Amino acid sequence: MAAGKSIRRQVGALIMFSVAALGASVISSTAKAEDDASRFTYTRLHCTADRQSHFTDVTIELAKENFAPPAAPIAIGGNKRTSRAFVAGFAANWGAADLQTHLNHPTPAVQLFTVLRGVFSITVTDGETRVLHPGDLVQLEDITPCKGHITVVGDKPGFLLFAR
C-alpha cells in the first residue's frame, strides 16, 4: 500500500516536473473560434517521411449557411466524412508511465477528438508538448508507421469525443 502511494507521488512529481521543465515550449492548444466566427483554428498532429510526429496549427474558413431555418445563418466549414463517433473516458494520470518510459504510440486511425472534460497533454516525437483543455480540437494523423505520440491525462479523469 505504501509502495503504491510512493509510486503515485513519483509519477505525479514527474508530470509536474515535465510540464515545468518544458516551460516555454509547452504551447496551449489553439483550437478557438475567431472574433468574426468565419475562421476556426485547431491542432493537427501529423507524421513526416522520417516517421516523426509534429504539431501544426490549421485554420479553416467558414461560410454562412442556412443550417437550421428559420434560425439565422451560421458559419460552417471543415466538412469531413465520419463513420463512427464515440466518447472515451481516461483514468486520472493515464499515460504517465508511458511518458516516463518514452513509450510513443500511433493513432489507430485518422480521427478528430475534442476534449470534453479534464486536462490532457500530448508530446510528439520532435519534443513539443501541448496541453489541451475542454473545447480543444485535435486531428490525429500519426498512424503506423509513424512513431506516434504520448498522451497523459491530468490528475482527474478525462473525456474525449472522437470522430473517425
Image (cartoon, rainbow, N blue to C red):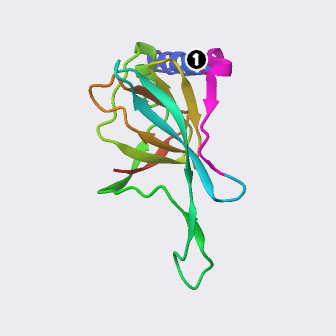
Of residues 92 and 86, the one nearer the viewer is 86
| Drawn side of residue 146 relative to residue 57, left or right | left
| Position of 40 relative to 51 (above/below) | below
Based on the picture, tell me whether residue 22 belongs to the magenta stretch.
Answer: yes
Residue at the image position 67 percent from the left and 19 percent from the top: 23
Residue at the image position 59 percent from the left and 42 percent from the top: 133
Q: In the rendering, at what x and y percent does residue 83 appear?
A: 29, 57
Q: In the rendering, at what x and y percent does residue 17 appear?
A: 61, 16
Residue at the image position 58 percent from the left and 17 percent from the top: 18
Q: Which quarter shows the N terminus? A: top left
| Drawn side of residue 49 relative to residue 78, left or right | left
Q: Secondary structure at mark 1?
A: helix
Q: Which residues are magenta?
A: 19-33
Q: In the rendering, at what x and y percent does residue 53 appear?
A: 42, 25
Q: Give the quadrant of residue 118.
A: top right
Residue at the image position 60 percent from the left and 81 percent from the top: 71
Q: In the rendering, at what x and y percent does residue 8 appear?
A: 50, 21
Based on the picture, tell me whether residue 59 belongs to the magenta stretch.
Answer: no
Task: Residue under label 1, please give it.
Answer: 18
Of residues 80 and 122, the one nearer the viewer is 80
| Drawn side of residue 106 relative to residue 54, left or right | left
Q: Residue furthest right?
A: 35
Count numbered badges in the picture.
Answer: 1
| Structural crowding at the residue carrying mark 1, measured as other residues with C-alpha within 10 Å and reported as few (<14), some (14–19) or many (≥20) | some
| Position of 111 relative to 71 (above/below) | above
Of residues 120 and 146, the one nearer the viewer is 146
Q: Residue furthest bottom?
A: 70
Of residues 71 and 123, the one nearer the viewer is 71
Q: Please name the amino acid that badge 1 sits on.
A: Ser
